[in-house]
Amino acid sequence: MSARRLPSLSALRAFEAAARHESAKQAALELSVTATAISHQVRGLEEALGVPLFLRRPRKLELTPKGRELQQVLETAFDSISAAVERLGAAPSRQAVTLSTTPAIASRWLLSWVCMLRESHPEIDLRIHASHEPVALDGITADLAIRYGDGRWPGLVAEKLLDNTFVPTCSPHLGLTDPAQLPAHPLIHFRTHAAVSAPIDWSAWQKLAQVPGLDVNAGLVFSDETHAIAAAVGGQGVALMGRELIEDELKEGRLVQPFGPELIGKPFFLVYPERRRDEPAIQAVRDWVMAVPGGLCSLTG
C-alpha cells in the first residue's frame, strides 16, 4: 500500500476548529493555543494545498467552497476518531450476576474463593443469594443456582459439583467410638421445609444403624447447617452432616466421624438456563464455580 499523502495533522485540527467556530480566537480557546498560532497553522495548510480555505472578513472567517468541502470531511473523520478513542478507553461495563445457593454452600465453600472470580473478571459483580428455598432463574431473582437433586430440571443445564455423603460427626472430646454410645449424647438436627435441603436425617440413619434406645426426635434443632456444625464442633452433641461440607473440620481434627453407617444423598449441581449457556457472564461464573477447590471439577481435573 502506498503511503497516505496528508498535510500536518495539527494544521488540519486547527483549520477544523476555526471552521466550526468561524473564528480563530474561539478555535484558539478550544485548543489551548493562541489565535496567532491558529492563523499560522491555517495559512500553512492553505500553502500546502495550494488553495484558499477562508475568506477573511472583519471579525469572522468565511469558508470558501474548497474550505467547506475539507471542513465536512474533517468533521466526520474527527468525530469517528473521537468515538473510537472513547470506546477503547472506556472502562468495561459492569454486569451483576446472581448465584443462588444454600447458606452452608455459600459460607463454607464459595466465599473463600470469590477472589478468583474478581481477579479473572473484575467487570462482574457477583451477588450470592443464600437461601434454602429454590428460586426462579429468571435473570431477576437469580441467574444461576446450586441445587440438590437428581440433575434433571427441564430447560436447565445441570453440572455436578459435589457429592453428598452424610456421616455421624462430633467433637473428638466426646470420646465416641461405638454407635451404642449414641443414646447418651444429644443429637443435633438440621431441619428446613425447603425442598432444596437433603431429605436425610437421623430417622433415615437409624433405619440402617438400628441403635437400641436411640430417640431420633430428641436433641438440638437448627434451621441452618452452619449452626449445626458449630454446635458439633463445640461438643454440644452428635450431628449427621454432609461430609463434603465439613472436610476442613475433619482434616484439622475439630470433628471426627466416630462410626457409620454412611448415607448417600443426592449430589449438588450447578444449574442455569439452557438459553443462556453462551452468555459470557454466565460462562464466567460457571467456570469459576466449577474451578473452586473441593468441587468435582477440581478433584477430577
Image (spheres, rainbow, N blue to C red):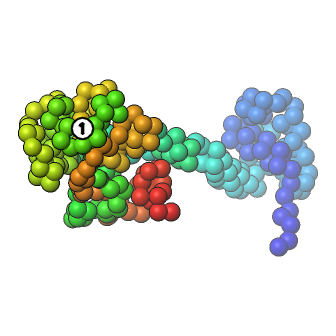
Where, by quadrant of the figure, is residue 283 drawn? Answer: bottom left
At x 64%, y 44%, the residue is 89
Can residue 20 be seen from the camera position used here?
Answer: yes
Q: Which residue reaches farthest bottom?
A: 1
- Residue 258 is situated, as x and y percent measured from the top left of the image, at 30, 43
At x 35%, y 61%, the residue is 159
Depth check: 138 or 44 in front?
138
Where, by quadrant of the figure, is residue 61 drawn? Answer: top right
Left or right: where does residue 194 sit relative to residue 226? left
Q: Identify residue for label 1.
A: 239
Q: Residues within 10 Å of mark 1 (few under 14, many from 20)?
A: many
- Residue 242 is situated, as x and y percent measured from the top left of the image, at 29, 46
Relative to 203, residue 5 above or below: below
Left or right: where does residue 137 sit relative to residue 203? right
At x 16%, y 31%, the residue is 184
Can residue 79 be seen from the camera position used here?
Answer: no
Depth check: 84 or 10 in front?
84
Where, by quadrant of the figure, is residue 248 drawn? Answer: top left
Relative to 124, residue 234 above or below: above
- Residue 237 is situated, as x and y percent measured from the top left of the image, at 23, 31
At x 82%, y 30%, the residue is 33
- Residue 222 is situated, as x and y percent measured from the top left of the image, at 19, 32
Depth check: 157 or 164 in front?
164
Q: Quadrant of the N terminus?
A: bottom right
Q: Secondary structure at mark 1?
A: strand
Q: Amino acid at mark 1?
A: Ala
